[in-house]
Every structure is written in C-alpha cells, then in structure tokens.
Amino acid sequence: MILGMMILVDDHFIFESSSQIQPQGISDAEGTTCILIGISKHGNHAMPFPQNPYHCPMKKLLGPDPAPEWVEFLDFHTQTLHAKANDTILKEGEAVEGLYCILQGKVKVMQKDGEDERLVRLAGPQDILGHRGFGGDWKYPISAVALVATELEFLPLGAFHTIAKINAAFVCNLMMFFAEELRISEEKKLQLTVLQRIAKTILQNYTAFGFEEGSALLSYTISRKDMASHAGTTYESVIRTLADLAKRGVIQLEGKSIGVLDLPALKSIATEG
C-alpha cells in the first residue's frame, strides 16, 4: 500500500499523501511504501544516482543491491569532512551528532582511564566512528583523533534515525558490525600474556592500516606509548617484547617503524602464545 511521498527539501521532510503515486518505493515490514525524492538546493529535480553505490563506505550498510532511492538518500544527507593530523574528530562526553565513516586516513579511538587515556582501537578506511554513543545518554563515551590527514563522511543523527526506522538491511548490517566489535572487545578480557597482548596490538595496527606498498613495513606504526595503552602494559614491557619478537624473526624494527616478517607466526602468538 502506497501512502504517499516523502520529499527531502534541504534537511527537512515533507510528506504528501496521494493514492495516485505509482513509482517504485521503499517498503517497510508491513508493506507500507514511502517514495523518497531528493530535491536539490539548486533546483527541483532529483539528483542522479551514482554509478558506484559504494563510492561512500556508508552505503555498504545498505547491502549488496540497495534500492536507488536509499542510495540517493545517503548522497543527499552525508557530508564530507576533513581532519588534519592530531585533530579531534569527536570528543568523549559530547552529545552525539551522527555517524562517521572514514574515506581515507588513519584514526585512533581513545577513552579516559582515570587521568590517562587508553587506546581502544584503531580505525582506517571503511571503518565506522561515533556508533558507541548511540543509546543511553546519547553522548560519546570515546574520543577519536586523526593520526594523519583524514577524510570522512558524516551522516547526521536525524537522517540516521530516518533510515534506521525504515531500512531493515541498513539496521541488520549495522548490528552485525556492532556484534563483531563486541566479540573483539570480549576477547580482550581473556587472560592473555603480555606477549599475546602486544602481538594482538600489532595485528590490529596491521588490520587497520595495512602495509606500505611493496613493503613489509606497516603503513603507519602507532607509538610505543599507544601500544602500551592498548595492550594494558608498560612502555618498558613493549620495548622488551618488540625486541623479543624481532629476535624470533617475526617482526623487524626500523627506527619507530615496525615490519611484519611472519604474519602467520604473529597471529599464532596472538592467539596461542
């Protein structure tokens, strides 16, 4: 049953009821259909659909074959933001404004631990930021800081609520992301040795940022202080453990940079010790 047309004008919705609307729309679980049309600020015409539905990573949440109306919805509402190295993207304790997704760059996610800050995770291209503030008091429980020049897309909270209430695929894929992050977080609570925890930290550094092209060196090596924070150990223990891993031939140390010479061995140490 088609109830009407939801028209997007700038950042506002106008619902027009009509029994004559026939174009393809977006149906909820009860079969009710809303037609979403983006009205450009430069004229009353719908913006063209992009050739590549995954030009912005946020669209991955729509699933493999998204309805073009939802692709256009995200195109209309997402904004592109730029952060310089050491810029704060979002700050712990501030009200949630929306959802971020990294287009390119490198980010560290921190959380206060008494007077210090603890490294929670690393985030690179395609990764989501800001979701930890959803629910509860709707305040960010973490801070996110750019490690290098970083480009992000941002979906305002109002637009997020709109798509989350109607698009089941978007919500399901976001829940799968939440579940995977929770699983990784729960793994960290296991009783692991310092060697295992530091091996896991190096693996997360690799997973988030990858290698330099044609090299075994990590494209960005986090500081030894951040390694200690993430692994829940001391700076001195990090130095000793890195030297041990290098002696075993698992990694190589080049100044402040780290290269991974034996990735399977590093994974084995992280899981089995």
Image (cartoon, helix red, strand yellow):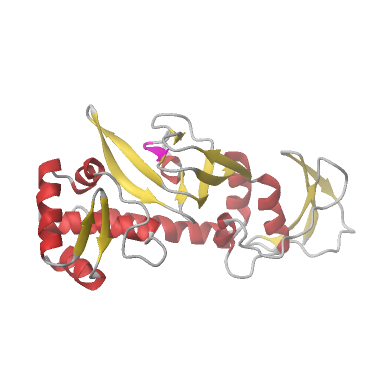
Q: Of all residues shown, which one is farthest toward the front?
A: 255
Q: In percent of the image, x 45 and y 34: which residue is there? A: 87
The spot of residue 7 in percent (x, y) is 79, 47
Query: In this orientation, which residue lies closer to the viewer: 51 or 46?
Result: 51
Q: Is residue 91 left or right of residue 28?
A: left
Answer with the quarter of the image where residue 145 lies.
Answer: top left
Comparing 145 with 100, the one in front is 145
Q: Quadrant of the C terminus?
A: bottom left
**Furthest residue in direction bottom, as rendered:** 264
Residue 109 sits in quarter: top left
Residue 143 in the magenta stretch? The answer is yes
* Figure check: 95 above or below 219: above
Q: Seen in the image, is 186 located left or right of residue 173?
A: left
- Asked whether residue 234 appears in the rendered view, the answer is no
Residue 250 visible, this angle: yes
Residue 242: image location, x then y, percent: 15, 54
Q: How many marks?
A: 0
Residue 96 is inside the magenta segment? no
In this rendered view, identify the residue nearer to me: 104 or 115. Answer: 104
Q: Main secondary structure of the magenta part?
A: strand
Magenta range is: 141-145
In the rendered structure, the answer to whether residue 109 lies left or right of residue 56 reads left
Which residue is depicted at the point 77% across and 62% down? Answer: 1
Residue drawn at 37 percent across, 36 percent down: 141
